[in-house]
């Protein structure tokens, strides 16, 4: 009886700890949402509240003041993030599969060459010259995808994961007449969903949050990424609020009450919203993919 009581008490204690731990993540997110819908004056007077003191949509009105621009930014970001993720996974997984095969004679030199790129890089100026003067993909959607198709660190992780798969699967498939590509496509990839989902999520997050590429290589406003566009809106509001020389075309917006604080939180919601819907689909593979890729090798 005492053992059962102590076990139940222990379970309840663990549940309380987990609930508190979950609230530590949920409450800040709810606070961000609340602040984004708060009035700027109430924020300055009362501070951040989980329940807005005065409900206000001014921050979202400024962000979506030009809906076409936001739509283009969402479209560009989605295409380059999703397209770059799938293209990158194909390139990196094929490279990793070849490097995981023990009968590939150039395996070690190529692995050393890939690892060398983790330690040393050419820098921004050589990259800029290559992209603008030789590849001529600046100011196009391809500048978001092609230069970042392969990541050396992710290739090594995938190679480590592939090496952990049983060799008997590959050998038996070859005995049945399967080619290397068929082994890779129909056997290796289906068994590697945890690793691919983990790497895919990392690539997706990295590309979705990319703003530097737009800053350096893009001049067409229709090709701006969402992060760069939001940053540009915020910088313009800060500048105009300080200069006090902005002629707003939107109604019911006071020049002296521009929401420089609440708009930051509104931008976080606008930028992170789609990924919050995508993450649950990757979650079941995430932990397993990280564990296998980190332990072996």
Image (tube, helix red, strand yellow):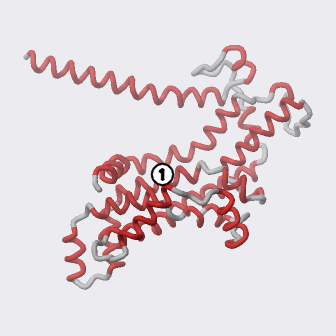
Q: Is residue 233 above or below residue 83?
A: above
Q: Identify which residue, 244 or 91, lies in the foreground.
A: 91
Q: Point out residue 142 in the picture as x, y percentages from the top left corner.
A: 64, 66
Q: Is residue 184 above or below residue 164?
A: below
Residue at image point 62% right, 38% down: 268
Q: Give the quarter of the figure containing the N terminus.
A: top left
Residue 9 location, quadrant = top left
Residue 44 location, quadrant = top right
Q: Point out residue 123 in the picture as x, y percentages from the top left corner.
A: 62, 57
Q: Identify which residue, 185 or 127, lies in the foreground.
A: 127
187 sits to left or right of 49: left
Residue 230 location, quadrant = top right
Q: Point out residue 218 in the picture as x, y percentages from the top left corner.
A: 74, 59
Residue found at the very far left of the displayed protein:
1
Q: Secondary structure at mark 1?
A: helix
Q: Give the quarter of the figure containing the C terminus.
A: bottom left
Q: Which residue is mark 1?
A: 202
Residue at image point 75% right, 52% down: 69
Q: Point out residue 96 in the picture as x, y percentages from the top left corner.
A: 39, 66
Q: Identify which residue, 10 or 288, lies in the foreground.
A: 288
Residue at image point 71% right, 65% down: 138
Residue found at the very far bottom of the displayed protein:
177
**Within-10-Å neighbours for mark 1: few <14, some 14–19, many 20+:** some
């Amino acid at each position: 009886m005492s053992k059962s009581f102590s076990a139940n008490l222990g379970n309840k204690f663990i549940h309380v700890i987990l609930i508190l731990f979950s609230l530590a993540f949920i409450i800040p997110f709810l606070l961000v949402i609340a602040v984004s819908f708060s009035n700027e004056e109430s924020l300055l007077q009362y501070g951040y509240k989980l329940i807005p003191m005065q409900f206000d949509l001014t921050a979202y009105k400024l962000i979506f003041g030009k809906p076409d621009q936001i739509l283009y930014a969402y479209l560009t970001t989605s295409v380059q993030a999703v397209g770059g993720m799938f293209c990158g996974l194909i390139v990196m997984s094929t490279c990793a599969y070849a490097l995981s095969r023990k009968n590939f004679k150039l395996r070690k030199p190529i692995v050393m060459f890939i690892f060398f790129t983790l330690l040393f890089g050419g820098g921004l100026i050589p990259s800029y010259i290559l992209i603008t003067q030789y590849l001529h993909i600046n100011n196009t959607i391809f500048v978001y995808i092609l230069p970042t198709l392969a990541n050396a660190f992710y290739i090594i992780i995938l190679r480590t994961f592939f090496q952990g798969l049983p060799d008997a699967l590959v050998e038996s498939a070859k005995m049945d007449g399967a080619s290397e590509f068929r082994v890779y496509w129909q056997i290796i990839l289906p068994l590697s969903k945890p690793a691919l989902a983990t790497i895919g999520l990392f690539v997706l997050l990295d590309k979705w949050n990319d703003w530097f590429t737009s800053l350096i290589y893009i001049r067409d406003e229709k090709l701006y990424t969402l992060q760069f566009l939001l940053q540009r809106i915020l910088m313009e509001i800060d500048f105009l609020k300080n200069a006090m020389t902005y002629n707003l075309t939107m109604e019911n917006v006071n020049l002296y009450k521009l929401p420089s604080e609440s708009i930051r939180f509104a931008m976080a919601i606008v930028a992170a919203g789609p990924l919050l819907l995508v993450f649950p689909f990757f979650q079941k593979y995430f932990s397993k993919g990280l564990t296998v890729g980190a332990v072996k090798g």
